[in-house]
Image: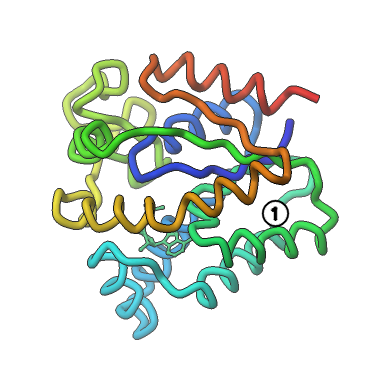
Amino acid sequence: MKNIIFIAPPAAGKGTVSDYLVKNYNYEHLSTGDLLREVIKSGSEFGKEIDKIISSGNLVSDDVIIKLVSDKLKTLDESRPFILDGFPRTLNQAKSLDEMLVNLGITNNIAVYLDIDLEEALKRVLGRITCPKCKRSYNKNIEKLRPVNGNVCDDCNVELESRSDDNEETFKVRFSTYLENTSPIIDYYKERGILKSFDVRREPSVICEDVSLEANND
Ligand code: AMP
């Protein structure tokens, strides 16, 4: 299976597709948002700075995030394909990522673009809940993605949580930041011939199938 670089606005379905690929194809899921939230949890001064930036809906600086990803990529298990979720978010990050992958000899990659409009993304983001233990994603506003029992994880039986930056005000900043930065990244991967686009206004299971078929395609 090919490694997947996700390009998608918040709430386009990256979490759901990632869960599917991890479960069914043994993908390793690397989310820069999760890495940053771990830094925040540490309670350090650096974590407090990161928290302020994330809460405002803005982007963490390229230097910080590139270092985090570069360190993490070196630790990945070479025998498993990986998903990069949330990175790159700027053209500069995309170019740095290329360098990192070349240096590590990783060539089997596709960029998966999940296209969604603001209205649909907002509806999803306001319903999004995640298991703090296994990170499985659910959505109160999408019938097929609701947890079976109220607000607890189907797998772990742990209370599900929503993210503090999943509110309307922060989300609108995050979405416009995404739009501003994304077109050049899309063009960048298109030029390299590795961009694959998916229409996300379909059943989550169909989208997951489609992405996995593409990732398995030689
Ligand atoms: P996410 O969980 O991917 O929605 O990321 C949550 C927040 O973390 C974003 O709104 C940004 O503030 C920050 N973040 C995550 N990934 C990146 C990145 N590649 N570059 C800059 N900031 C990022």
Left or right of 84: which side holds 122? left
Instruction: Kindly indicate the quadrant of the structure image that contains residue 109.
Output: top right
Q: Residue at x 26, y 30 (%)?
A: 139
Instruction: Kindly indicate the quadrant of the structure image that contains residue 55.
Output: bottom left
Residue 120 versus residue 157: which sits nearer the camera?
A: 120
Q: Residue at x 31, y 31 (%)?
A: 138
Circle 1: residue type: Leu
Residue 181 versus residue 84: which sits nearer the camera?
A: 181
- Tell which residue pokes out farthest to the right in this image: 105
Q: Is residue 159 visible?
A: no
Left or right of 59: which side holds 122? left
Q: Residue at x 48, y 14 (%)?
A: 206
Q: Which residue is mark 1?
A: 76
Circle 1 — which element?
loop
Q: Position of residue 161 (x, y in %)?
A: 23, 44
Identify whether 159 is placed above or below 31: above
Picture mark count:
1
Q: Residue at x 34, y 46 (%)?
A: 132
